[in-house]
Image (tube, rainbow, N blue to C red):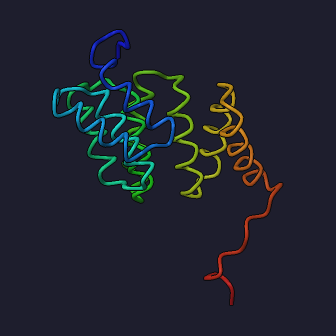
Amino acid sequence: MDHDDPDWDDAQEGAELLGEELVEEAIVELTRVLEENPRNAYAFFFLGNAHFEKEDWQRALKAYLTALEISPEYLGAMVGAGHALRMMGKSKEALRMVAQVLARNPNDADAFYLAGVTHFYRGEDAKAYEFLRRFLATDPDAEVRLEVVGMLEVLQGKILTPPDPDDVN
């Protein structure tokens, strides 16, 4: 998507509020933008991010999917939808979104991360390891890097995961 367009500019105030962790204010601003232009895919994307921050997975997914209806090649909205699906327990659907992103951009760092964490929580260690390593190779920021390194250490057995209380006799 081209960031040199009026829709991008119109969505920036909401994106900035979201970046400042003013989620409710961002929702109000992005809703205002969408009332003026209901075809602004960027505003729907950032609205999805705001709902995701509130852990309102259904609304986040709806906003991301609306962005994709408007702009079917919007990779960020695909990844956002994938994370919302993952958080809703729909890991197969999340992995389908990963496949859609990687079909368009085989080196998409966000898709590597989504695939890695989804496979990690599904207990698919080999696939999780592969995608998390690929993600680390993209030189992510320190906070996410630490999270991913922690998951890789669990996969390598360097950190023992606590036993599941349901598995104890």
Above or below residue 45? Residue 125 is below
Q: Residue at x 69, y 39 (%)?
A: 143
Q: Quadrant of the C terminus?
A: bottom right
Residue 36 lies, in percent from the top left, at 16, 28
Residue 159 lies, in percent from the top left, at 80, 58
Q: Quadrant of residue 71?
A: top left
Which of the two residues, 161 or 147, is positioned nearer the viewer here? 147
Residue 60 lies, in percent from the top left, at 34, 47
Q: Seen in the image, is 74 located left or right of residue 167?
A: left
Q: Residue at x 56, y 38 (%)?
A: 113
Above or below residue 13? Residue 80 is below
Pick out the residue farthest to the bottom: 169
Q: Residue at x 61, y 46 (%)?
A: 128
Which of the two residues, 101 or 41, is positioned nearer the viewer here? 41
Q: Quadrant of the N terminus?
A: top left
Q: Seen in the image, is 153 located left or right of residue 17?
A: right
Pick out the residue farthest to the right: 158
Q: Residue at x 44, y 46 (%)?
A: 83
Q: Seen in the image, is 68 located left or right of residue 131?
A: left
Residue 22 lies, in percent from the top left, at 45, 43
Q: How many marks?
A: 0
Above or below residue 158? Residue 27 is above
